[in-house]
Image (cartoon, rainbow, N blue to C red):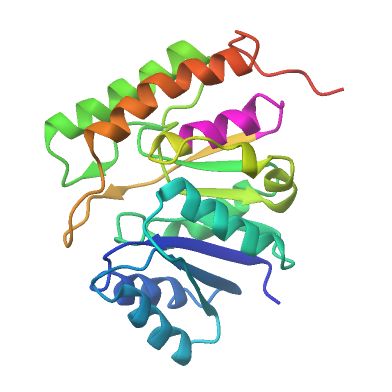
């Protein structure tokens, strides 16, 4: 079996998913795709099944209902860890993440336990966002860094590559956040253990089809969650040192 799997959570992405699958598989790399669909009412799950019937590298995990981004990824991680994948990716299904960056992640993962795709490493690399959304994202990154001490330029990003051992070192049952703050929590759990975290620059292109899942509830969850992470780390703004 190929050693790399890309996990793509979906909810109402029937128009975006075929494009994304074509772009990923078009790289002709030894990898697999896992679509985790939350019973999308627009039929995304059926589209995923039809694509899987044509592509042996594509797998589909159906969930009974919409239960949040974090729960979808944790279900995908559990599926992947039951199989011998060494590198496990997170990637959005709306084409905002460029599959052409996958080799760059894999190269960085040779010497890192977690690789973050950063929109703000070596400059701002965001296309098609209004200024208000960009400022919200930049402010969130600074807020997270100020409270937790994590030195990363883009702690809220959702394009990541975990080594297998890294995910196994995290108790996924104890992950509490479920919106975009899930990304912050997972990175913090890796970083505070003293594991190696690297950033690679990416270009983020906002979706052209469908609607964003961002909401006021997601923002509020993130605002409070970073304080909980700080307390969990014994009010430290640095990781523990591995011996």
In the image, residue 35 above or below residue 1 = above
**Of 175 and 149, the residue lying toward us:** 175
**Of 63 and 230, the residue lying toward us:** 63
- At x 77%, y 18%, the residue is 241
Residue 135 shown left or right of residue 64 in the figure: left
The segment highlighted magenta reads 183-196
In the image, residue 140 above or below residue 89 = above
Rendered location of residue 148, percent (x, y): 51, 16
- At x 36%, y 57%, the residue is 66
Classified by dominant secondary structure, the portion drawn in magenta counts as helix
| The N terminus sits in image quarter | bottom right
In the image, residue 140 above or below residue 178 = above
- At x 31%, y 68%, the residue is 40
Q: Is residue 194 magenta?
A: yes
Rendered location of residue 147, percent (x, y): 46, 12
Extreme-right residue of the structure: 243
Extreme-bottom residue of the structure: 54
Residue 5 shown left or right of residue 49 in the figure: right
Q: Quadrant of residue 14?
A: bottom left
Q: Is residue 193 magenta?
A: yes
Residue 125 shown left or right of residue 54 in the figure: left
């Amino acid at each position: 079996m190929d050693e790399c799997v890309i996990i793509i959570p979906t909810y109402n992405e029937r128009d975006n998913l075929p494009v994304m699958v074509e772009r990923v598989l078009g790289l002709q790399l030894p990898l697999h795709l896992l679509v985790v669909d939350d019973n999308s009412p627009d039929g995304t799950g059926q589209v995923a099944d039809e694509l899987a019937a044509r592509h042996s590298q594509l797998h589909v995990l159906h969930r009974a209902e919409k239960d949040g981004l974090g729960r979808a990824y944790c279900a995908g991680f559990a599926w992947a860890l039951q199989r011998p994948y060494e590198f496990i990716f997170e990637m959005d299904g709306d084409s905002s993440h460029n599959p052409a960056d996958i080799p760059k992640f894999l190269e960085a993962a040779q010497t890192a336990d977690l690789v973050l795709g950063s929109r703000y490493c070596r400059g701002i690399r965001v296309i098609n966002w209004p200024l208000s959304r960009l400022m919200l994202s930049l402010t969130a990154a600074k807020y997270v860094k100020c409270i937790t001490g994590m030195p990363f330029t883009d702690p809220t990003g959702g394009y990541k590559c975990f080594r297998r051992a890294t995910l196994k070192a995290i108790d996924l049952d104890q992950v509490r956040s479920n919106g975009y703050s899930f990304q912050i929590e997972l990175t913090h759990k890796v970083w505070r253990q003293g594991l190696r975290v690297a950033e690679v620059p990416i270009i983020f292109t906002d979706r052209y089809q469908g609607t964003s899942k961002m909401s006021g509830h997601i923002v509020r969850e993130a605002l409070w969650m970073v304080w909980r992470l700080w307390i969990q780390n014994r009010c430290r703004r640095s990781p523990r040192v591995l011996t």
